[in-house]
Image (tube, rainbow, N blue to C red):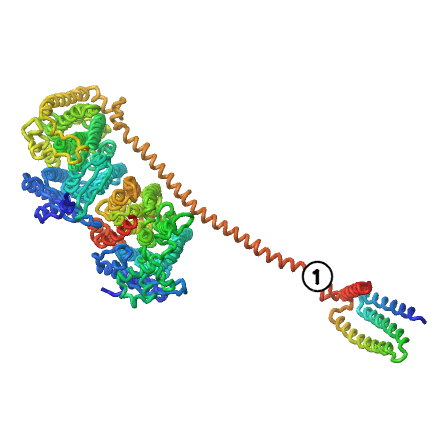
């Protein structure tokens, strides 16, 4: 039997800890110092992040081949329970470190130009530092509690960055929505923490995993038996809590990674500055959910994984549909992000651990590239605005034909778009193909109703290619539409290509979106990424565990691979072709597009309003909650407090009653006595007339009476 | 190490109050400095008490050995002939259960004194009463004789009544009377139980002295005490030698209940067909739940807060509410652990209900101070939930929540006070976009809001997390409350985020707009005095959020002793 | 002369005196009435003394009564004069200071 304290005992000193501290301290330093630096804040922030990137690359090169170095120490103890912190530097953490720092540096660099004229840029760069710090925390810590802590902190930085332009009401509302939706997901995360803690008395993932292996199912109860401080601990929970723990933790990811049904915050989050959208809401933070699922992957049981897969597939499809009728270029990208995150989650759900993480990495590159390209367009269009000319620089209706004006942006955007659409030669193809293949194999094994997942996944391929190229045709081909939309007497400044600050990050990310980066191959299994990160084995008790994809015969993959490849390429290409016929310059939809206020047709309406999910939340659920809350406040004020006041008033009334009784009854009795006496006195005194003769008469009368009495 | 440290801590503010009284009325500006110095000394002494606290001492809550910094002297005693004798002690001391609250009280009172510098009228009376309040609050936390405790407990009401009733807002009389009467109802319940307990509990050491078994207190070894207890339980002790006692530590030990006494564990006294112990437990629980406050006894809180001046709100939310929680731990749970287990479902449910109910009410408020008052109800629900769990994590969480809420709510009320000082208005809807006008104020209130809604990195998170894990573990370990309670309680976190962020968005974000044009001039950013009182709180909140071991290492053993006591009674 | 006749005279005299005392408003007239009643008594006393040949107790009593009546008249008249000086009237109906 294993002792918990041995698993989570403090490790020996390792100089690596200095690097870890440095990695987290540098962005934090940026957060604390930029406010005081005013002018040089952008350069300072970018420099610090550059240092961080160098450290990550150095660490990656040092620890590339190790199986993972962990560092653990005590944080605090409750009773005899130790709560620890622990870091794990494994390949996954290293890759994430490099990706996050790389994109963060690029976004910092990009922002130097993008935010040049914003007077609050010290705050902006500080918040980017805070975000990077929190994100690195999620990556480096190997302890669910710490992951949760930094999980909430990225939520905070996301809140502050979405609401960066807080004077805009829509921005602050979007920030609130993001934070609260994330919080709803985090309820699940906390519930998961509670379940795991009550079973294992630790949050350390190493401890949880080691003890999960040893736990067993007895009579439908999930029993964990181990020693703790030399005493035998035997904790039992109903077996369903095992699934519940997985699903609850997944809820956290549903919030953070914008999965159905909490995904509505992400489109609104586009209110933040575009580089922020690239960093947080496309490349890194939203992927943290997937990263977290990867960290807890081995303790998910079959049921939890099914839920994960279903949610992922639904999200991917719904968001893809929502993306194809948007006018706002950032909204298209936002929905596309949700959709791609759905793919990653789906991958995790079917057990394709490596494929999901691979897609996380490739998506981080090409989606950040797309956002930064879009940012360049927005920034350059924004330059054209002046006091006479007002338009929304994010609206695709004012764009068109930008290929001629901004060729570099066009190339970068196109490369990243091809990666998004999943066409061969680009990184997205490799990872998406791997996900589709694994999904297909999983469903063949699983069978039954799960085929709809496959249908949704493949349908999403078609729609993705379609909306991506719709965007490209609308933005880059045809004529520039803006000059026709502005008042006749005004003239536009010429539209220019962005400068080096804007171009360099785009170009680097576009290069990162080429599949050669990951290996000269058409198969994901042949990339270096697959050689570094393998699918792990499930650790939950056997009767609850899902099957491992690795255990399935290799031929299944081989047989399906060509078919999946062919179908996905065919679907993607047909998506491109449909987009070409509908939105090429001069085509039917393209021509009428610019006049539309909102899309025409039922499907387009559903798409535009994202299945009316947001309306459901805001118009019905939120309204209901606010109504309910008002009722409760009314209850508190009128009924409960009223009851207290009633008691008080009743007492006062009662006191008055008593006082009346006292005054009138008790005191009245006394009064009656005196009154009676007084009346008697009144009566008797009338005899006392003061008239002497009357006295004599009286005396005489009595004398006579006495005589009569004496005599008779 | 200073002798009689706790006594100095308690009575330094009282000394300050005397000085305030003796100073002539004309020296208006000197009163606040007297108060500040007195409470500053108290704070230093309290920190000294915390640093000299030996965290390694172990023991059940009902043993006097685990107490530290004890001051004990007989106050008065009454001969009752053949009924024995009853004695009241001046008995103060700390263990892990009240140490953190003593520190909290000293910190909050000191900061409250700084914030009281804004008081302009009748300063002499104000600071005199404030110092009097300080003494009774501090005394309440360290008193270990029930009589003494009750004295301090009741004595809080008087200065509080006048502080709200004289220096308060427009409806101050109503609020003051409501506060006074409400708390008094609770006090009466406590008083009844106190009398019942005094009838049932004896002090073994004093009984030994009286009977001549031992010559002096130093001879009272644990063996000797248990032999005396055995003699009493067996009925061998002469009844006139039995010394009845208000000692709260003795009350927590079943062996100190007289045989056949009304509230003794094995005597089965009955009231309305219910076990007298259950009724007594409920009476204590309700008495302190009013103070806490828990649903449905909370309605005095919003009114008292809204009408009270800032510093009094701070003390009220920061410390007075904690006396409710502390009282439940020190009396109700310690004296009647078996009844606590019997009613744990109910306590947990009311805790849960307070969490959700308070949060929902906060969501509907239009007055900033009312909102924070209801959020206090919500946060104090965690204390009940953690206690009901009866696990180490849950109880630690409850104590930590009291400590952390003391700091956070103080900061929130101070911040509301800052705004109120400038405009004399607290309506959420009367402001908009304050962030652009008062950026530093906005930063601090954002920190306070996020700390209060339980963001990791702030002390509130640690507390709530411990309550959650402790409450969930409860069912596995001891079976006090069911699994679904903590799971449902997490909803409180979302509601908390809801009302705070909504307020933030309505008041601070968006375009700058205020209802009254004159406010544009008066709304200036924080001044130096306000920084002095707010920044230390921010530092403390963050410190206890990232390094909870500072406090937990001190209280761990006591909490374990407390939960051991609970578990032993269940078995 | 038979005794009865004298006693009847005395009684009649007494009744007249009493009537004067009770009905007259003037204080002096009331005094006169009183004198009449006293003398009615004297008449009775003298009449009864016919049966007391030895000691003449009745006649002596009558002498006493006359003396007392004289004193009484002197004191009463003095009071009446003072009353008159005080109230400016001797009408007994007006003088009712003692009315309760």
Query: Can I make out residue A336 in this image?
Result: no
Q: Quadrant of residue A260?
A: top left
Q: Position of residue A227 (x, y in %)?
A: 17, 45
Q: Position of residue B145 (x, y in %)?
A: 33, 59
User: Relative to A241, does residue B300 appear above or below in the rendering?
Assistant: below
Chain letter for mark 1: A
Query: Around disc 1, counting alpha carbons within 10 Å, would you say few (fewer than 14), some (14 to 19), or many (20 or more)?
Result: few
- Residue visible at 27% across and 22% down? A602
User: Relative to B546, does residue B21 appear above or below in the rendering?
Assistant: below
Query: Can I make out residue B235 in this image?
Result: yes
Q: Residue furthest bottom?
A: C54
Residue situated in front as seen by the camera: B396 or A148? B396
- Residue visible at 70% across and 61% down? A684
- Residue visible at 25% across and 52% down? B559
Q: How many marks?
A: 1
Q: Quadrant of residue B516?
A: top left
Q: Is residue C30 left or right of residue A435?
A: right
- Residue visible at 6% across and 29% down? A526
Q: Residue furthest right?
A: C1
Which quarter of the rendering shows the N terminus of chain C? bottom right
Q: Position of residue A591 (x, y in %)?
A: 21, 21
Q: Is residue C50 left or right of residue A15?
A: right
Residue situated in front as seen by the camera: A222 or A241? A222
Q: Which residue is mark 1?
A: A684
Q: Position of residue A218 (x, y in %)?
A: 21, 36
User: Relative to A503, does residue B108 appear above or below in the rendering?
Assistant: below
Residue situated in front as seen by the camera: A515 or C3? C3
Which quarter of the rendering shows the C terminus of chain C? bottom right
Is disc 1 placed on a helix, strand or loop? helix
């Amino acid at each position: 039997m294993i002792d918990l304290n041995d698993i989570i005992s403090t490790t020996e000193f390792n100089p690596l800890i200095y690097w870890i501290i440095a990695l987290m301290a540098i962005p934090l330093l940026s957060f604390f110092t930029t406010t005081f630096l005013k002018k040089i804040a952008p350069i300072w922030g970018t420099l610090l992040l550059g240092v961080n990137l160098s450290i990550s690359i150095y660490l990656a090169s040092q620890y590339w081949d190790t199986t993972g170095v962990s560092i653990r120490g005590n944080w605090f103890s409750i009773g005899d329970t130790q709560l620890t912190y622990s870091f794990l530097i494994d390949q996954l953490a290293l890759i994430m470190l490099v990706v996050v720092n790389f994109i963060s540096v690029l976004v910092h660099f990009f922002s130097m130009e993008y935010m040049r004229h914003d007077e609050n840029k010290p705050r902006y760069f500080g918040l980017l530092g805070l975000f990077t710090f929190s994100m690195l925390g999620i990556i480096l810590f190997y302890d669910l509690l710490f992951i949760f802590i930094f999980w909430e902190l990225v939520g905070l930085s996301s809140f502050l960055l979405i609401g960066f332009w807080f004077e805009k009401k829509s921005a602050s509302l979007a920030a609130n929505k993001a934070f609260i939706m994330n919080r709803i997901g985090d309820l699940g995360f906390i519930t998961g923490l509670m379940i795991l803690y009550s079973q294992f008395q630790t949050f350390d993932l190493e401890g949880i995993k080691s003890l999960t292996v040893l736990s067993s199912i007895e009579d439908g109860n999930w029993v964990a038996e181990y020693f703790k401080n030399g005493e035998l601990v035997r904790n039992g929970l109903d077996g369903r809590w095992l699934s519940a723990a997985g699903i609850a933790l997944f809820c956290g990811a549903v919030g953070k990674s914008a999965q159905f049904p909490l995904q509505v915050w992400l489109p609104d989050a586009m209110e933040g500055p575009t580089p922020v959208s690239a960093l947080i809401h496309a490349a890194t933070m939203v992927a943290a959910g997937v990263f977290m699922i990867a960290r807890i992957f081995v303790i998910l049981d079959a049921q939890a994984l099914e839920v994960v897969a279903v949610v992922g597939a639904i999200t991917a499809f719904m968001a893809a549909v929502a993306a194809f009728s948007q006018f706002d270029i950032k909204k298209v990208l936002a929905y596309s992000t949700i959709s791609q995150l759905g793919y990653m989650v789906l991958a995790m759900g079917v057990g394709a651990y490596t494929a999901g993480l691979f897609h996380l990495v490739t998506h981080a590159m090409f989606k950040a590239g797309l956002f930064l390209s879009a940012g360049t367009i927005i920034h350059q269009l924004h330059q054209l605005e002046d006091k006479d000319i007002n338009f929304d620089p994010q609206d695709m209706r004012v764009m068109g034909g930008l290929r001629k004006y901004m060729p570099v942006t066009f190339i970068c955007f196109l490369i990243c778009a091809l990666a998004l659409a999943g066409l061969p030669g680009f990184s997205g193809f490799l990872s998406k193909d791997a996900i589709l293949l694994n999904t297909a194999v999983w469903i063949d094994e699983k069978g039954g109703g799960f085929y709809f997942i496959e249908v949704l996944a493949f349908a999403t391929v078609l729609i993705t290619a379609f909306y991506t190229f719709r965007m490209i045709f609308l933005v880059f081909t045809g004529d520039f539409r803006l000059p026709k939309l502005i008042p006749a007497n005004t003239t536009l400044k010429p539209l220019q290509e962005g400068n080096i600050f804007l171009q360099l990050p785009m170009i680097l990310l576009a290069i990162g979106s080429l599949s050669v980066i990951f290996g000269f191959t058409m198969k994901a299994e042949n990339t270096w990424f697959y050689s570094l990160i393998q699918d792990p084995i499930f650790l939950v008790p056997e009767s609850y565990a899902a099957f491992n994809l690795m255990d399935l015969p290799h031929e299944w993959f081989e047989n399906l691979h060509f078919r999946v490849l062919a179908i996905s390429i065919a679907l993607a290409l047909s998506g491109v072709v449909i987009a070409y016929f509908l939105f090429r310059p001069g085509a039917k939809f393209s021509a009428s597009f610019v006049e539309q206020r909102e899309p025409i047709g039922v499907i387009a309406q559903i798409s535009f309003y994202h299945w009316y999910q947001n309306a459901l939340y805001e118009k019905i659920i939120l309204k209901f909650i606010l109504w309910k809350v008002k009722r409760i406040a009314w209850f508190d004020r009128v009924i409960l407090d009223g009851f207290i006041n009633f008691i008080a008033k009743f007492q006062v009334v009662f006191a008055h009653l008593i006082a009346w009784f006292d005054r009138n009854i008790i005191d009245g009795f006394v009064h009656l006595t005196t009154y009676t006496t007084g009346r008697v006195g009144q009566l008797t005194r009338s005899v006392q007339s003061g008239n002497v003769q009357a006295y004599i008469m009286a005396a005489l009368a009595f004398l006579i009476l006495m005589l009569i009495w004496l005599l008779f | 190490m200073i002798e009689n440290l706790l006594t100095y801590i308690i009575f330094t503010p009282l000394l300050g109050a005397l000085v305030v009284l003796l100073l002539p009325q004309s020296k208006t500006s000197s009163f606040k400095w007297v108060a500040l110095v007195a409470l500053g000394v108290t704070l230093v002494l309290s920190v000294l008490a915390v640093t000299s606290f030996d965290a390694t001492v172990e023991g059940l809550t009902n043993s006097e050995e685990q107490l530290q910094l004890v001051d004990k002297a007989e106050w008065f005693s009454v001969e009752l002939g053949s009924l024995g004798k009853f004695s009241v002690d001046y008995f103060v001391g700390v263990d892990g259960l009240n140490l953190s609250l003593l520190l909290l009280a000293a910190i909050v009172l000191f900061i409250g004194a700084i914030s009281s510098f804004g008081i302009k009228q009748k300063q002499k009376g104000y600071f005199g009463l404030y110092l009097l309040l300080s003494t009774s609050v501090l005394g309440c936390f360290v008193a270990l004789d029930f009589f003494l405790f009750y004295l301090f407990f009741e004595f809080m009401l008087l200065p509080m009544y006048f502080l709200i009733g004289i220096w308060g807002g427009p409806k101050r009389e109503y609020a003051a009377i409501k506060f006074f009467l409400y708390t008094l109802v609770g006090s009466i319940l406590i008083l009844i139980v106190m009398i019942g307990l005094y009838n049932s509990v004896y002090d073994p050491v004093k009984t030994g002295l009286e009977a001549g078994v031992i010559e002096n207190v130093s001879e009272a070894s644990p063996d000797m005490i248990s032999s005396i207890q055995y003699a009493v339980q067996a009925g061998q002790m002469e009844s006139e030698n039995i010394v009845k006692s208000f000692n709260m530590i003795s009350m927590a030990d079943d062996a100190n209940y007289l045989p056949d006494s009304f509230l003794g564990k094995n005597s089965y006294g009955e009231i309305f067909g219910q076990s007298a112990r259950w009724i007594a437990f409920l009476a204590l629980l309700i008495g302190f739940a009013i103070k806490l406050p828990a649903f449905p006894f909370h309605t005095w809180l919003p009114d008292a807060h809204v009408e009270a001046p800032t510093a009094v709100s701070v003390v009220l939310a920061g410390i007075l509410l904690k006396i409710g929680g502390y009282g439940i731990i020190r009396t109700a749970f310690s004296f009647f652990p078996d009844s606590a287990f019997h009613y744990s479902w109910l306590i947990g449910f009311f805790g849960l209900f307070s969490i959700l109910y308070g949060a929902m009410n906060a969501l509907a408020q239009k007055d900033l101070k009312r909102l924070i008052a209801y959020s206090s109800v919500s946060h104090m629900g965690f204390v009940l939930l953690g206690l009901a769990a009866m696990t180490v994590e849950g109880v630690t969480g409850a104590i930590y929540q009291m400590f952390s809420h003391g700091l956070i709510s103080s900061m929130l009320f101070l911040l509301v006070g800052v705004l109120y000082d400038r405009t004399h208005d607290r309506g959420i809807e009367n402001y908009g976009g304050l962030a652009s006008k008062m950026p530093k104020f906005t930063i601090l209130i954002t920190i306070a809001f996020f700390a209060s809604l339980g963001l990791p990195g702030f002390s509130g998170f640690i507390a709530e997390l411990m309550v959650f894990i402790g409450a969930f573990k409860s069912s596995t370990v001891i079976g006090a409350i069911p699994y679904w309670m903590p799971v449902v309680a997490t909803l409180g976190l979302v509601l908390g985020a809801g009302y705070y962020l909504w307020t933030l968005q309505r008041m601070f974000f968006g375009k700058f707009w205020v209802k009254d044009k004159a406010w544009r001039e008066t709304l200036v950013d924080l001044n130096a005095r306000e920084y002095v009182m707010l920044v230390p709180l921010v530092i403390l909140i963050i410190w206890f959020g990232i390094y909870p071991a500072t406090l937990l290492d001190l209280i761990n053993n006591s909490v374990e002793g407390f939960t051991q006591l609970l578990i032993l009674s269940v078995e | 002369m038979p005794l009865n006749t004298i006693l009847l005279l005395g009684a009649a005299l007494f009744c007249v005196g009493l009537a004067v005392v009770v009905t007259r408003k003037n204080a002096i007239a009331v005094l006169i009435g009183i004198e009449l009643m006293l003398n009615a008594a004297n008449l009775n006393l003298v009449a009864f003394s016919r049966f007391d040949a030895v000691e003449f107790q009745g006649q002596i009593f009558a002498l006493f009564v006359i003396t007392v009546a004289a004193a009484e008249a002197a004191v009463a008249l003095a009071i009446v004069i003072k009353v008159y000086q005080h109230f400016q009237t001797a009408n007994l109906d007006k003088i009712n200071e003692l009315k309760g």
